[in-house]
Amino acid sequence: MKGYLQQRFVIAAALAPTVLIAVYFIWGFGAATAYLSFTDSGFLPSTKLIGLLHYQKLFSSARWWNTYGNMFIFGGIYLFGCLGIGITVAAMLDQRSHSAIVYRTIYLYPIAMSLIITGLAWQWVLSPTTGLQHFVRSFGFENFGLNILGSSEFAIYAVAGAAVWHSTGLVIVLFLAGMKGIDTDLWRAARIDRIPIWRTYTSIVLPQLRSVLMTAIVLLSFNVVRSFDIVVALTKGGPGRASELPALYAYDFYFVRGNIGRGSAAAVIMVVSIMVIVLPYLLYELRSRKQ
Amino acid sequence: MKTYLRQPLGWALAHGVLFLLALYSLVPLYVMVVASFKSLDEILHSSIIAWPMLWTTAGWEKAWSSACTGLVCTGIQPYFLETMLILFPAMVAAIVIGALNGYLMSFWRSRGADILLGALIIGSFIPLQLFLIPLAITMQKLGIFGSTFGLILIHTVYGVPLTTMLYRNFYVTLPPELVKAAIVDGAGVFKIFRSVIVPMSAPITIVAVILVFGGIYNDYLFALTFGEPGNKPIMAAVLNIIATQYGVAEHNVNMAAVMISALPTLLIFLIAGRFFVMGLAHGSVKG
């Protein structure tokens, strides 16, 4: 008995630093920021409560709605782009394994690059004075126009396109791994029944990969909500604030405009937005694992 | 006849799509590599995209050792060093803590440990923006705001959830008899970890090193917020180098700076691609 207690004590002591991380640095900090969103904190944090004022101001601010709406434009393109391209490519690579290694390397290397590098690289490619527009015009097509970064309406699409470039490889990896786990008898049966390959994928293979799809959607959605680096490097949220995303908004209010209260409110909304997707997913995973 | 017609068409279509996507994937890298090896003169007179007439490493040399950020002209070299000084201690700490956690959470399970794991898993889906202000206050109180040690601590703290999940997901696939047999032999909790579990952890440790290295090296948010002014880690520094322009933009130097910054993680991907892919699959499927 004494040995058992001693053992439990040793384990608890070994887990203590992680308890500190979870309780203080993650959940404690999260609660603190939630608290700050109800206070009149300016450049410095304050403990004076002012109720829902920051949320009222946030929800009546045109800048916030533009920013929050951008998140959905960006997220829509990002999810559909990554999933559409990623699943198609995974199926094609799954079919031919010999040329797959070269293609796989080409499609996957962008995930190794940081989002800052991604943003900078695409900024040069899309810049009207140095990139594609300049290049095409130098062949005599003087009217060729590609100034997507200078367009208030379309700059966010450029950000989304660069993000798709970066993350498609993640979807390819997840789905290739999933397809490897498909029973080979299924393939044999489909071949005997003369079902076309694409049909086998859409009606037999993909429905079996539902949980992979859910994982991919959750991960990509998380990337959408926290996106910061890629916008800073590609457009700085511009022109003006046209391509701003919530993370930039929060950062601006925290450290530039000296309104910690409002920045915290924005961060809380970001967290709520992602948890709406993550929590049902984790519950579902937990339940299916118990069964 | 019908299938004969359909097959080559399908083949051509598939390869056409794969080829076009490969172009999309390669264009940004091509532009940066090619432009970084041109002279500034050539870039100004042709474009950044055309194949170089003359290859030169002048851009790379300047980017490494004499390009300016603000008024300081030391190249990217010191920022690279600063990043490594932060990266290695934080990586080792996060991996050691994560491996121990993973071991205790899979072989010595208790209700408390399960709750802790759940708290870490949900916590790993919280955008880091939620932590910035309390983190800044804490760093200030500890007197390590804007210091190398501060960033080591921050990266360790927020690296532990990932490493814990990696090791835990790996250890639960090992047979529990391994540990049970060692207990019968009279070995203690840590003795078993050291002599039974650690020797079996090589594959997952390679994966963890790759993921944590990439995560810390590619970090921008913490580098920007908590980096020492004038000595920030590489992703913040490279943006400053590019923002610092006197007169004509030196695109060759800028692109070389970006290439140098991208090189470490790119090389790891090319050398250890198999583990990289494994890591993405492992690290992604949380819980």
Image (tube, coloured by chain):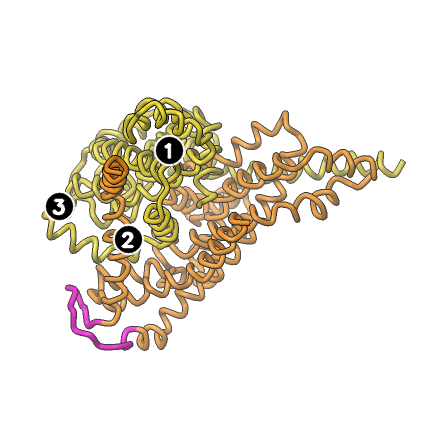
Residue pointed to by mark 2: A26
Residue A6's image quarter?
A: top left
Q: Looking at the image, is B143 positioned above or below residue B39?
A: below
In the picture, measured across the screen, residue A46 lies left or right of residue B203, that is: left
Q: Looking at the image, is B264 positioned above or below residue B20?
A: above
| Residue that appears at 24% across and 51% down | A25
Label 3 – label 1 distance at C-alpha: 27 Å
Q: Point out residue B70 in the picture as x, y percentages from the top left corner.
A: 19, 44
Q: Secondary structure at mark 2?
A: helix
**Residue A45 on the magenta segment:** yes
Q: Amino acid at mark 1?
A: Ala
Label 2 – label 3 distance at C-alpha: 19 Å
Q: Colour of chain A?
A: orange
Q: Secondary structure at mark 1?
A: helix
Viewer-side residue, B201 vs B134: B201
Residue pointed to by mark 1: B208
In the picture, measured across the screen, residue A202 lies left or right of residue B6, that is: left
The chain to which mark 2 is attached is A
Residue B87's image quarter?
A: top left
Residue B66's image quarter?
A: top left
* Residue B144: mark in rendering: 3
> Is circle 2 on the same chain as circle 3?
no
First in sequence, mark 3 or 1: give its number.
Answer: 3
Viewer-side residue, A220 vs B34: A220
Q: Point out residue B200 in the picture as x, y percentages from the top left corner.
A: 40, 24
Kindly report which numbered mark, 3 or 1, lies closer to the viewer in this rendering: 1
